[in-house]
Amino acid sequence: MQPSSLYADQNVSDVDVVVDEEFLLQFKIGQDLFAIKFSHVVEICEYFPYVVYPYQDEKHLGIINLRGTVVPIRAAFKENLRPAILHPLLKYIILSHPDHGRFGILTETVKKISVTKQEFDSFNGLESSLLKTEGLPVRFVSLNSLLESI
């Protein structure tokens, strides 16, 4: 049987492509877990020292050179202001904002998680939305709310 004949008796509109889950990146800052849409993530890389320079904004930690591109590293939320102990378990999450370009945040852990499309649609864009993964509360943050917090 030829592939084109598999659905010969059905209209294209009768064949539904169901995307029933949304992927999020869960990350930990301080003692709190957060999640952001995976589509905003450019990359995740292991920690290496960033260059600190004097800057008026206390939430601006410094910059890194990522394969020839300068990426500002920002402190996400109050818990992430100039971490006192920098250890090799830290990671950078490099995010891309359509208006503000790339920026990075420091985090302790990252994990790809999925939620049902229905669950995602119920909290999409709401800053106070909580979901549970493995019994732990995870706060969903939109890219805009994350950028505003930093």
Image (tube, rainbow, N blue to C red):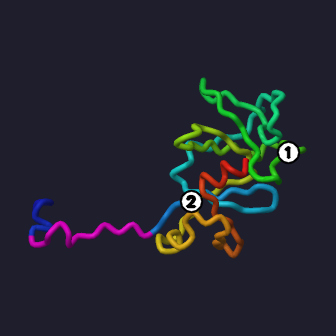
In the image, which disc is placed on residue 83? Answer: 1
Tell me which secondary structure the magenta stretch mostly adopts.
loop
Amino acid type at image mark 1: Pro
Q: Residues within 10 Å of mark 1 (few under 14, many from 20)?
A: few
Where residue 138 appears, as percent x and y from the top left, is: 68, 67
Q: Is residue 38 found left or right of 9 in the rendered image? A: right
Please state the horizontal and vertical placement of residue 121, each as a whole percent of the image.
50, 70
The amino acid sitting under disc 2 is: Leu
Name the quarter where the N terminus is drawn: bottom left
Q: Mark 2 points at which residue?
A: 24
Seen at 63% across and 30% down, the residue is 66
Q: Residue at x 69, y 34 (%)?
A: 72
Q: Is 45 on the left or on the right of 90, as rendered?
A: left
Report the front residue among 90 and 11.
11
| Residue shown at 61% from the left, 66% from the top | 126
Q: Percent position (x, y) of residue 38?
A: 54, 54
36 to the left or right of 61: left
Q: Where is residue 82 in the image (x, y as percent from the top left)?
A: 85, 42
Which range is magenta? 9-20
